[in-house]
Structures are given as structure tokens and as C-alpha cells.
Image: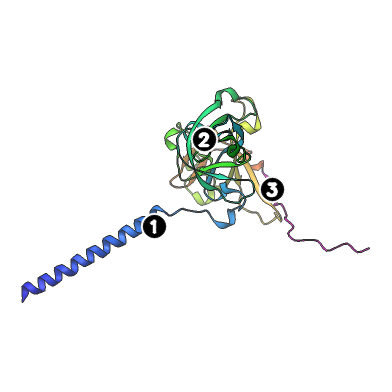
Amino acid sequence: SLEAVDELLASVDANDDEVEEEEAVEFEKRVRNKRQFPDTTTIDPYDPTTYGYVELGTIIGAHGVHGFLKLSSTTDFSEKRLCEPGIRHIKPPNRRSPREVQLAEGRPLRPDSATTGSDANPIYLIRLEHIQDRESALKLRGCVLYSLEDEKVDDLLDEGEYIVSDLIGLNVFLDEQVYGDAKKDLFVGNIRGVVMGSEICAIPGLGQDLLEVLLPKRKELQRGEEMVLIPFVPQIVSRVDLDLRMVFVKPPAGLLDLSYVREEKVKIKGFLPAARY
């Protein structure tokens, strides 16, 4: 009868809905636990910052007898990443990959303002769960603390500020508003690194951050990579579009001609044959 057919079709639709719902849940679990890794050619197995981690600082010793650790901070967001409890990652000197730890608490011992304009890093006191005494804390001296690169801090950035890892890999073009619309002819290169102004000059405000840009390879260049440094200032870098992964620049005449060649270091693996006398 028609009623029996309708009941059969309804039961089939209900089963299909249940299967689709189960598949959606499983897909959501896979996506939630999925981590994006960079191209394997850019990974250094001994440097976790090349495969999804951000360095926060190095443990330099113990403080007191209750398991507190003294950490030399290398992050610009110490208050958030070193003081707020949560999951962090720690890598001992004799291991390749960081392991997960729980940050219980943290506070500044020597704040950022006390080290401005000097080579010294801010010192923070942190405590990890399961580290309850000085002896256990001393065993962690030399370990490096990391957080996941996916843990963004965009809400702490001022206008015109960017995370270094977000800039690396962006393509650089001459600003089409100044030089025209043919983007193919306006391509400059690819950002391979950022040279911090604080590394160039210890006096605050005198040094400018520099974009290290890899230029297209020329036929006459036999070895190495041709690079150019572009000051990261509004007068030269007119726009940064993270969604399109593009940076637009208005370089003064002659800036792009100040290139240099960075030669790759040759690593010799294995043992050399014994010398013959």
C-alpha cells in the first residue's frame, strides 16, 4: 500500500540522516585535532619554530624551594603567554620535539620596561604542574618553552603591527597604485625573514625592522640566493594584505639594486677516509 511505501521511505531517510550526522561528527573531530604543518623542505627537525611552534623563552634556573622556574623571555606577549595558565610545550636540550606541559602560573621578576634599550631579556617566574620542589626545577634548566603557532594573539596587536611568522612567505609587489596594474611585471620577490630593528641598534626608536626579500633567480647567478632588505616603514611598505598573502611597496630609486648574495652553507655528512702516510 502507499502508506507502507511512505513508512519505508521515511525510515530510509531517517537512517541516511543518522549516517550523515555521524559522518559530520567524525569529520569535525578530525578537523579539530588536525594541525597544519609547513612544507617539508622548510623544516629543520632541530628547530620547532619551523614546524608550528613559537619560542617563548629559555629556563635559566630555579627560584625558591617550591618549584618556581626562572625563564628568560623572548616573546613580545609575555603577559599573555607566560602569565596565563594553560597548555604550553617544553623541549629539553637533548630532545628534538617539545612535549606538552601545563603552565600553572607566572609573573614578571624583571619586567619588560626594566630591560628596554638593553640586550637583557625580561625574566619571568613560572610554575609548571607536577614541579613542586627545587630539585625538580633545577632539572629543567636549559629547556626551551614553546606555544603553538595556531594560538593567535591578534587582539593584542596595534594597528600596523604584525606577527613575524605571518609575514614570512608573503609575496612582495610594487604598489599598482603607483606603478600600474600589471602585477606580473610588478613582482619583487618573496619574504624569507624579518631583521628586527632591536638587533641592529640597541637604542629604542633608531633601528627599523627590515623585510628580507628573496629576489627572482637570475641566469647569471650561479650559486646562492639574491636577497634585498626593505625597511618595514609606512613610507615604503604601503599595504599588507594577509588574506591575499601580498605586500605592496613603494621603494625609493635604487633600493632594490642594493641586493646581496646569500650562499647556502654546505653540510658534510659522514666520515672522511683515514689519511694515508
Is there CB contact under 8 Å for labels 3 and 2? no
| Along the viewing direction, whichever of 63 and 249 lies nearer the viewer | 63
Quick check: is 274 in the magenta stretch? yes
Q: Where 105 sits versus 5, above or below?
A: above
Label 1 close to label 2 by CB (< 8 Å)? no
Q: Residue furthest right?
A: 277
Image quadrant for the C terminus? bottom right
Q: Position of residue 275 (x, y in %)?
A: 88, 62
Q: Which residue is mark 1?
A: 30
Region of the chain picked out in magenta, as a range: 259-277
Counting residues from the N terminus, which is met first, the one under dot 1 or under dot 2?
1
Q: Nearer the viewer, mark 1 or mark 2?
A: 2
Q: Which residue is mark 2?
A: 127
Is 185 inside the magenta-drawn segment? no
Tell me the element at label 1.
Answer: helix
| Circle 3 residue | 262
Mark 1, other Cα within 10 Å: few <14 / some 14–19 / many ≥20: few
